[in-house]
Image (cartoon, rainbow, N blue to C red):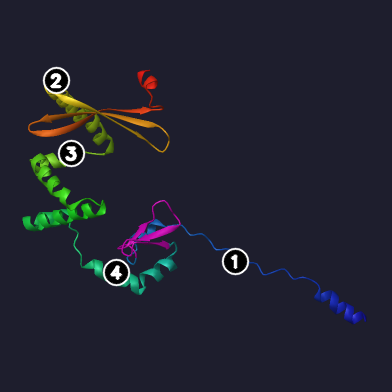
Amino acid sequence: MAESSGHESSDSVMNPPPSKKVARTKRFSDSWLTEPDFSSWLQKCDGNPLKAFCTVCRKKLQCGKADLRRHATGQSHITMLNKTQGLTDIDSAAWLASASLGDRVRRAEIMYVLNIIEHSRSFRSYEHQMRMEQRALDSIDVLNNMKLKSTKIRAITNNVINEAIVSNVSEILRNTLFSILVDESTDVSGYKNLCILARYTYEGAIHTYLLDDLRLREGNAEYLYD
């Protein structure tokens, strides 16, 4: 009995579980960028120091030499690398200096078409834009010195184009008979929008110009008078 109780007591003792190995977090090392096996395709991953980036495969990778070597010897990476080695950098100064006018024109046309597709623009509207650009850009110096971003575009729209339109239409209405149109609609928030328009003829065509757009809480005469 004593022996059996001894065995039971020893079996009932719980052995601690084996300790798990904690994976060390590896950070990107700048020295990898100069290594021959990695220098042609490896980059830092913006915003994440624990990742690397393959410029050939366009994908994020785990940091660590073993992971990078595994990726470099993978069949998919090798195939993509062989494809890119035959390509020419058409933005390089050397290519632009040696390329013919026809090649440079084809390059520009392809870049314009890519821009149309990327921003889902109308093909027909771009015909007008090309004519406008050829008229506006009288030399390459003008194009190189143009700087148009959203803030400047908004400022030109409000302070230059809008003021010119208002001044032009005001001058026309001073010397032309016109009709006033009123259109009212209600939006989902319950507010009423009152549009006041002027319709007139000018140079043989009928034009409609928005004079004002008022946001109203009520559409009765008393509120409009106040």
| Position in image of residue 178 (x %, y %) | 16, 25
**Residue 54 left/right relative to 27:** left
Q: CA distance from mark 4 to mark 2?
A: 68 Å
Q: CA distance from mark 4 to mark 3?
A: 37 Å
Q: Nearer the viewer, mark 4 or mark 1?
A: 4
Q: Nearer the viewer, mark 4 or mark 3?
A: 3
Q: Amino acid at mark 1?
A: Lys
N-terminal-most mark, 1 or 2: 1
Q: Which mark is residue 146?
A: 3
Q: Amino acid at mark 2?
A: Arg
What residue is pinned by disc 2?
Answer: 174
Using a 10 Å C-alpha cutoff, classify the residue at mark 2 as few (fewer than 14 neighbours), some (14 to 19) or many (20 or more): few
Taking depth in this image into account, of 49 and 217 the one nearest to the observer is 217
What residue is pinned by disc 4?
Answer: 80
N-terminal-most mark, 3 or 2: 3
- Tag 4's secondary structure? helix
N-terminal-most mark, 4 or 3: 4
Q: Nearer the viewer, mark 1 or mark 3?
A: 3
| Position in image of residue 18 (x %, y %) | 67, 70
The answer to whether marks 3 and 2 mark residues whose Cβ atoms lie closer than 8 Å is no
